[in-house]
Structure formats: structure tokens, C-alpha cells
Image (cartoon, rainbow, N blue to C red):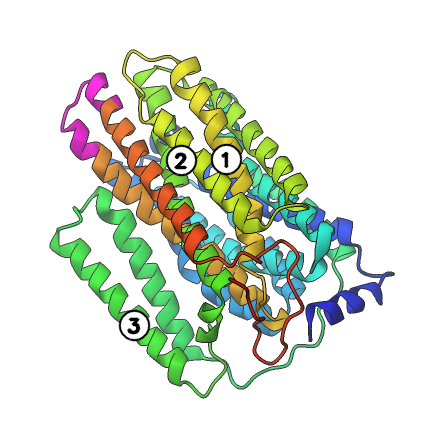
Amino acid sequence: MTNTESASGERGREGVARPELTLAAVAVVQFMVSLDLSVVNVGLPEIASGLGFGEAGLTWVIHAYALTFGGLLLLGGKIADRYGHKRILTIGLPVFGLACLLGGFAQEPGQLVAARAAQGVGAAALAPAALALLTRTFPTGKARVKAFGVWSAMNAAGGALGVLIGGLLTQYAGWEWVMFINVPMVAVALALALRGIAPDEPVERRGRPDVLGAVLATAGMSLLVFGVVRTDEYAWTSTVTLSVLAAAVVLLAAFLYVEKTTSRDPLIRLGLFSNRSVAGANSYNLLLGAAMASAFYFVSLYLQGVLGAGPALAGIQFLPFALGVVVGSVAAIKLGYKFPARSLLIGGGLLTAAGFTWFGMISADGSFTVDVLGPSIVTSVGFGFCLAPVVSTATVGVAPHETGTASGMLNSTRQLGAALGLASLSTVAHQRAGENADPAAIADGYGLGMTVGAVLLVGAVLIALTVLPRTSTAAPAPVEADRGLVPEGD
């Protein structure tokens, strides 16, 4: 079935499908999933004292979510394609909400870590299903540009406002509310989904499920994320880290072999990577995620550890960043009607790199206005320019029955990029600062980490220039149903 046929199917069910409610449901889901990547960060000291976490164990409040979310995204996307995007969304939402509720009532460290892992499982089902629904509901034209602009604004706002919301809730309501805050959002998203999203169309089951590929991909991705996030405890060159990463590479190599040779329905059809839009967007997204994850981390620590801001004030000082992303996303909607997505990715990447370069000049005797506010505005507007085009481009030329897989792959590259970037750049910053460093050395380390982030963004721009086709726009051409690809221009 082509995108055009899918759109006709949507019009044929006007009494059931309500695109505006679908967009609202997807926006709430994406805001919630992004929020959970950052909302607990500022509250970690209170969580540690409230539940008795040790210093090493506390990091698992972050890692448990990232590990299950990143490790299961490919599987989540495939399940959504095979069993229905709406069905998986409406199953994932209660799982996510229940995990949040249990996490808020946690009395021991293990209970909170388990709840965060369960949140990651729910998010791995939600994120690709929601993005696939957005692609199905808005297949072409101006409506698609606008829909992905709204999605990108909510995606970025969730990550940026998570720091603000987490700081305010921790200081004035208690750390438990960084978990409880998701419960009403789950209820709203579920109500919108049930009322506004069209029933799933019958799905053609293409052979038996690729169970072996699913196991290899999930284990390989989980080990890769696990090895990377543990570099805060075990050095990159340690036996533990090298062994885990080597095992991850072996599992992922085996996964690719199975996908190439299996007679079953593969988890990922490797032909997707011959689509330059898919390959380029995922490569771009990997580097963008690596840079932006480090930005949230370094700026939060700089505000609190060097400039002396409290949790609530640090959260408030992140507000201009969130607003800048919204401004950039709105501008990308308007410009997306006139310019190819490739052009927006190039311009947005260069602007974001300029902001990171400015961040690289932070100092111990700096100020919020010069060292944080100015570069935050430049970086956030550029980031907003990138978000909708990279997501829209990643599904250009992808058949409807593979949109969940493509969405899961895009989310996977972002999570993997975030894990790799944060671990790598924090190591760079730590080595520059040294042990028991004074504020000047710490600020210098953060500045170096941000400068390396600027280099990564320049690399993303080069990918957009050399890999993405010039004709890749927010309004994809009709899909060739059998192959799931469209001819692409240079």
C-alpha cells in the first residue's frame, strides 16, 4: 500500500480518524518520553538521600531507563509494524504509567531502578509506534511539515523543560513527583489515542517472526549501551569495558548476518539502508544526539557546580533553551514549505555548532548572561531547525508496513548517540579537569567537551551535504510498495 492509498484510507474513515487528536496524542507521548530522559537529573541528590543510594548505584536511576529504552527500540518498532501501531501505543501507555506510579512509591533503591527499567520498556513501545502513526496520518505536503514541526517542538521541550520541572518538583514537592508527573500525561495521551487514532489497518504478516534476530539485536544494543554508560565507573581501556563492547559488536554482527540470510520476517530489512534518506538521517541523528546530550549535562553541572545556582534556579535558567527550541521548530515549519529538509539540516547544524563553540568559552568567573544565555539561544534555535527535518527525512520512501521499524531505528540512533556522546565527552572533560580540580579547571573541562560537541555537529553537516539527496523534502514521493523505496535524486 502506498502513502497515497494510506491517505485515502484515512479520509474514508473520517467518522473515526481525527488527525488533530492523533497529533495531540503523539505530541503528549513524545513530550513525556523526552521529559523522562532529563526530569530526574536535578533530583538525583534528593533521591540518593531519600532512598539511601550509594554513589555508584545512583547512576542506575538514569542508566536503567536508557538501557531498556535504547536496547528495545528496534524490537518495539518491529512489534508495532507487525501487530498495529495504535494497539502497541495503547498497550505501552499503561505500562509506562504504572511504572511511573510504582517508582514514585519506591521505598528502596532496587524498587526505583526496577521501575525506571519498566519505564524504558514502555517507552520503547511508545516512541516508534507514535512516530509511525504520525507518518501514516500525515503522509505528504504542508500538513506533514506542520505535524513534524509540532512533534519536534514537543520532543525538544520535553528534554529541556525536564530540567526545569525536575528542579521545581524536587525543591518544592519532593523527588517522588518527578515520577508521578507522568501519570496524568499518560491518562491524557491514552484518552486522545482512543478517541482520535483510526483503527489499525489489517497487516500483512510476512512470514514467521525473526525471533533470533530480535534476541541478537536487543542483546547487542543493550550490551552496547551498558558498556558505554558504565564508562563513568570503568575506563574506556579497562578490561570490563572492552569485553562488554566486544561482546556487543559480536552480537550485532551476528544480527546483521541473520537479517541477511533469514527466511523469516526480518527485524530490519537491510535494504532500508540503501535509501540515502534513511541512512543519512540516522547518521546525522547519531551525531546530533551525541552533542545535545552532553550539552544538557555540562550546562546543568556548570550552573550548579561553578556558578552556584540551586536546583530550582538552574531549572529556570534552562527555560530560554526550551523556548529557543520552540522558536527554531516553528521557523522550521515555515521554511519547510519552501526549502528541502536537507537545507534546513545544513543550516541548523551550522547554527548549533556555532552555539557549541560559544559554549566552549565558558569560564569559572563567567556569568549566566554571557556564558549560558547567549549560547543557549543560538544552540537551541539551531537544534529546533534540525529536529523535524531529520525525523521527516528518516521516513522518506519507507513503505507503510516498515514505518515503525524506521521510527524505531531513528530513536535507536538518537539514544545510542546520546549514550556514546555523554560518555565520551564527559571523559574528555574529566581528563582535562583532572582529579580534585578547582572551578577554573572544571569549567575548562566542560568547555573542551562542548568544543568537541561542535566538531561532531560539523560532522553531521558534512553527512547532510554528502549523503542526503538534494530532493529529500518533507513531502515524500509515493512509495514503491514492494521494495519500500523510491528513486532518489542527487
As measured in the structure, the alpha-carbon distance from the residue carrying label 2 to the one carrying label 3 is 33 Å
- Residue displayed at 50% across by 32% down: 380
Where residue 353 appears, as percent x and y from the top left, is: 40, 35
Judge by depth and name the residue closer to the eye, 475 or 172. 475
Classify residue 307 by image quadrant. top left
Closer to us: 97 or 418: 418
| Residue at 58% from the left image edge and 62% from the top image edge | 396
Name the chief secondary structure element in magenta: helix
Residue 272 percent across, percent down from the top left: 48, 70
Spatial separation of the CA atoms under disc 1 and disc 2: 8 Å
Estimate the spatial distance between the alpha carbons at disc 1 and disc 3, rounded to whole Å.
35 Å
Residue highlighted by disc 3: 253
The answer to whether one can see residue 456 in this image is yes
**SS state under label 2:** helix
Q: Do labels 2 and 3 touch, CB within 8 Å?
A: no
Figure check: 390 above or below 16: above
- Amino acid identity at mark 3: Ala
- The mark found on residue 382 in the picture is 1
Query: Does 359 appear in magenta?
Result: no
